[in-house]
Amino acid sequence: MNTDVIIVGAELDAFIASIRLQELGYSSRVLANGKGSYLYSSGNIKVLDFKENNNSDKKTLPFFIEGLPTEHPYKLIGKDNVEQAIEWFFNHQISNKLRYGYFETNTFTISPIGLKIPSYGLYFNQINFENIYNKDVTIIKFQNQKDFHAELIAQSIKQYVNTIEILNVVQPDTNQHLDSSSLAVSFDNLSSPDDYFININKKINKKTSVVIFPAVLGLNKYMEIIRSAEKTFSKKCFEAPTLPPSIPGIRLNKILEREVLKKNYIHRGSHILKANIENNKCLSVVDNFKRIIKARAFIFANGGILMGGIKVKSNGEIVEEIFDSKIQNNNHGKCEKSYETLNALQTSGVLTDNKLRPISKSNNQLENVFFTGRNLSNWNPSLELSGEGVSIASGWHSANNISSYLHD
Amino acid sequence: MIINSYQPTSEDILKSMDNCTKCGICNSYCPVSNVTNQFPGPKYSGPQTQRFRSLEDLVEISPELCNGCGVCMSVCPNEVAITDIITHAKSNLNNKNKKISFVQTLLNRPETIGKLGNIFPAVSNFILHNSFFRYLASQFIHLDSNAPLPNFHGKKFKKFLEKVKIDSNKKNIIYFSGCAVDNYDSEVGIAVIKLMDYLGYNVITNTGLCCSLPMLSSGEWDAAINRSKKLIDSLSRSLHLSENIISTSTSCSLTIKKKYSAYLNFTDPKSAQISQSTKDICEYILEKHADLLEEKMNPINKKVFYHGPCQLRSHGIGQPAVELLRLIPKISLSLSEADCCGIGGTYGYVKGRNEISELIGKSLSEQIKFHKPDVILCDSETCRWNIEKSSGIETLHPIQIILESLNV
Amino acid sequence: MSKTNKNMPKIIVIGGGATGCGVARDLVLRGYQTTLIEFGDLGSGTTSRFHGMLQSGARYVVSDTPYAAECFKERETINKIAPEAVELIGGLFISLPNDPEDYPEKFIKCCEIAKIPCQEIQIDEVLKKEKELSNNILRAFQVPDAIINSWQLVNLLAKDIRANGGEVLTKHKVVSIKQHNNLVKSVEVIEKNGFKKILECDYIINASGPWSDKIAKLVDQEVELQLTKGSVMVFSHRIVSQAINRCRFPSSNDIMCPSGTVCLWGTTSEIVNDPDTTKVRPEEIQELLIGAEELFPQIKNYRSFRAWAGVRPLVKPKNFDKNIPLPRSHSVIDHNENGLKNFLTVCGGSLTTHRSMAEDVVNKLGNKLGINTPCSTDTIPISNSKNANWIPSSYFQKIENQKNFNDVVCECEAITKTDIEEIMKNENLTDFHDIRRRIRVGFGPCQGTFCNSRLAEIVVNHNNDIDIEKSILNFWSERLKGSIRTSFGDQAKQILLSDYIHQENFGLRLTEENAEKDDIRA
């Protein structure tokens, strides 16, 4: 079967690229190894941790991109493209399925330990700090649940709320584990969520106006379940994140996969070991079954060092093994302090042109290969809080570039 | 050294435990641990416990509850051979501590049962499907009374083969029929002969061979060695006739492709060649004859629902059956989103485990109820029997519908 | 039942490592009123920073035969009195082609003299059992090496000290020592919260290891030390089933020693001036890998998830000659020779001989005081437990038997919420590091990535006052200090995952101000 584009990786950028390519009329095949690093996030979309001055007008993302270094992926992609990509994402039906709220500036959600996290987009009923200021809050925790830190969250937010209580309740099915995914499955399997919530309602403080659940209220039926809770309690209900892997991340994954599988294909368990190149074009890739997979263009969205797209050798060398691309190596091994080492590792990556094509060591510029997301260099998702933003922008941008390339 | 290699050995498998970063994504997707708290999950039973197993003998019962679906391995971002590590543990436990149960010993020899049962198929079928005998079986040998047992088909497939003539103008293809087609699912085998004949092949088959997967999954490896060698030798003898071996069971073909080296350390050139030459039938047809099929296929008037078996994932080929089905003009095709139907090969046949299988299969049952298909397609035999039993809807191998659409 | 007696002299022991704890235990068993003072947590100095071996002595059998014989005797003794901290795995001495050819014969002969059981093993037998070893090995000798859990050891000692009427003061820093008429009178200590205390004493035993000189200087004395820093790398599973040593004169880069579920390779060797040096330099990691590669050709493909350094103190004898290696056996210095009548220093030796060092210095103390109670530390077991050896998988087996999977907090080391709460209650602990040192939370390959916040949730339930953000950050950055040293291969992924969870997901920020300082003893 002839596929236009092979996308290697399971990251958010991989799926965004495939969905965008389909929109532009190109078929793709996602060779996924794993499920993507966005499962470690809490479901919120972070584009950049920017600080606005108190007296400024509401400034949006492109303004703050100006202040970034020239080699930053946002700058390579171009602030207008980045803005378009983000807007496209939030207006797309994939976002609508999770009812992502798009704020055009940062708002704050709560992290699993109760700290404020700036987010550009929050999914349906993900807790926003604005929801809790001066309110009477109840945090619900399942008895013996160990991956939801109700106490830590309570400690952190108690300065912002009016009153706070933690309510321990019994899980929906006592024959199941108390980890996030078992809880989510047991919520999906509840024959009557209303009955379950009626029992809980008896124990909630009457004064409470906001109820916070751990983010485990179902994988498929979460909207129904939240609505059932809100109806039963007559109070606003929100989800606060658990320790990763996160259920909101898995929900997003399901929706992205469903979208891709409408017309395209995903190969699970596929490991790419090498590529066949001729005349500065990549013709095909070879997987761990020695299968040769041909395409007209290739995107490598396989997560950088974190997810194995780029490898670190014992002598400190950083390599991208398929094309031996030029790497920005910030010498993490030579750093004195741990935070310097972390920053050096995070900002190391593949060097690309502004079309996101890797710069080759030998000046033989490959014309149909693109790198996205955490493979890119000169950005630090942890410090900048820009993980999802760069993924979306680079996935979208590489798809657009491939479309131009294939059109010509 | 790690699992990216073409033929990972036992050593590679067990060493891959080091790659684990404890991210827990495998636990989130494990169909078993998501429905019961008796199984601690793949992360625990796999790489976590393996660190302790390498110190000394442990008394464990957790590995037994793994159903071998391989979903964990397909979602692991770090190439930890989780399912294989757990299966290794099952084998060690069988050797050192426990004897394998009688019912498992029976289930591990499906071709023997097939041969015996097919002496008087009518009688055997009566016994197999009579509720009194099932009750006795459940009490005395722990064969679950709900287990989806197939019907003995007598020598139907063998008799059909005898009538087929070899045409020296045609190409040859080797077909590993396996115990299911030989004894219980002759219709599938007959469909293969007809389809391959249509595509211009003589089908070379040796009946009476078993890939030993039930033995391998349950840890009865000593017995598996001889059988597997027998299969390799038999297939090798035919390799001069054709480059490729096709199979209609994604479980059997996976076993030949990867599990002989991973569990039994078959790394000799003969085994490696067999492993490289084996393909799933849809994989093969998609590669070689997709264009012809696209031309010749006619619409069919049935609502089709396709469920990709869990073990198909480990092939890394996506869902070739779906790609072929999409060539059928105006096909009404819906795809299963369930990772596993629950039966896990012979797992769900054992008394006490069938409940777990049912819970796992709940999501798939709900999807089937929602889509209301006329026919369900699945590439693996025990999955087909399981789905047909629980849904009451005819469940076939994809090539049977493909054959139908070709009006052969 | 307390053994200490109000009529016996008051002894202060400075230094809570194996030596100090051993001394304090010996003292209480002989009836002395004893107070042990430790700056950080027990064992956080040299005791926990070595390669984990309770050696048979074979390592020093050629270079210092009497010391080797003492080691062997002590190894047997410690296994008898503290079996729950010891695993008897055995050891091999391996010669490679580039090792001195005549050493093995000397080795065999000296083992005979020191009465250390030594047996040559066929190479193919060795290679069958230890599959990771290089095929180039020439000869192999089996000796009765063992491994010791040093954290467990000092905690058992401390429990016994307290049970017998002694006092153990951790997180107490010695500020000054008051002397009068050539006698030390009292020690002033300061606690973490700034609270100062004066402790009176009749004698001081200085067992502060690499800090012996700094402590001695408080009373205008000195201890001439050679401080050698050694770094160790941790590999994430048992590459070998027994300790592997190079069959040559003891030098750097020659021990691979299993310890619990991991394997320790070490050490480098570098002379330093500052006893607080714990930083591992990247060059040392490269040195360690190159050394390990000679024995284990695949080592660079394995996962190393931590590296640490410790400073070993050896006493320079009076006529110190730079060209002769320092003797490994311990020294007891009676500062009476320099005018201070009631101050003894015990230093040098090794963890294996900590008990005999303690016996020696307490005997000397007894001679000076005319108190002749004999030593009983070699016969009385340290704890009353079942006297079974350390089984590293025991925590895991307990969970498997009880099936309380949900209770597990630290997955790598199989530690449950119940285990943690018990420790917290028994010893009144809320500091994450104290809990970690006693029960191994965060010791495994993920280095606290996931158990950090779970631990915080448990601690906050017991003590509402803790600063969560600070505690979680502090725990993470301490674990990071060691785990970031070996950021290659899969460990690089783990480090970045840890960063994702703590900075990108939780919202913490690691900065100059809150990153772990090199000295973590406080």
Image: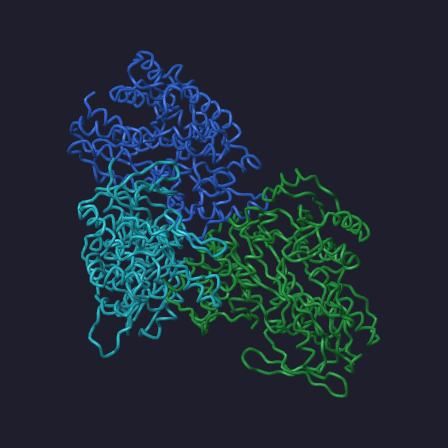
Looking at the image, the residue that sits furthest to the front is A363
Q: Is residue A307 above or below residue C203?
A: above
Tell me if I can see residue C460 in this picture.
no
Q: How is the image coloured?
A: by chain
Look at 50% across and 65% down and name the residue there. C481
Is B197 positioned to the left or the right of B274 in the image?
left
Residue closest to the eye, B107 or A119: A119
Q: Position of residue A152 (x, y in %)?
A: 40, 67
Q: Position of residue B108 (x, y in %)?
A: 46, 28
Look at 37% across and 71% down and name the residue there. A156
Q: Position of residue B351 (x, y in %)?
A: 43, 34
Q: Which chain is cyan?
A: A
Residue closest to the eye, B252 or C103: C103
Q: How many marks?
A: 0
Is A352 positioned to the left or the right of B272 in the image?
left
Q: Is residue A139 above or below residue A187?
A: below
Q: Quadrant of the C terminus of chain B?
A: top left
Q: Position of residue C139 (x, y in %)?
A: 70, 43
Q: Quadrant of residue B113?
A: top left
Is C467 positioned to the left or the right of C17 in the image?
left
Tell me if I can see residue B227 in this picture.
yes
Look at 42% across and 35% down and name the residue there. B347
Q: Is residue C109 above or below residue B403?
A: below
Residue closest to the eye, A273 or A261: A273
Looking at the image, the residue that sits furthest to the bottom is C181
Q: Give chain C's shade.
A: green
Q: Which chain is blue?
A: B
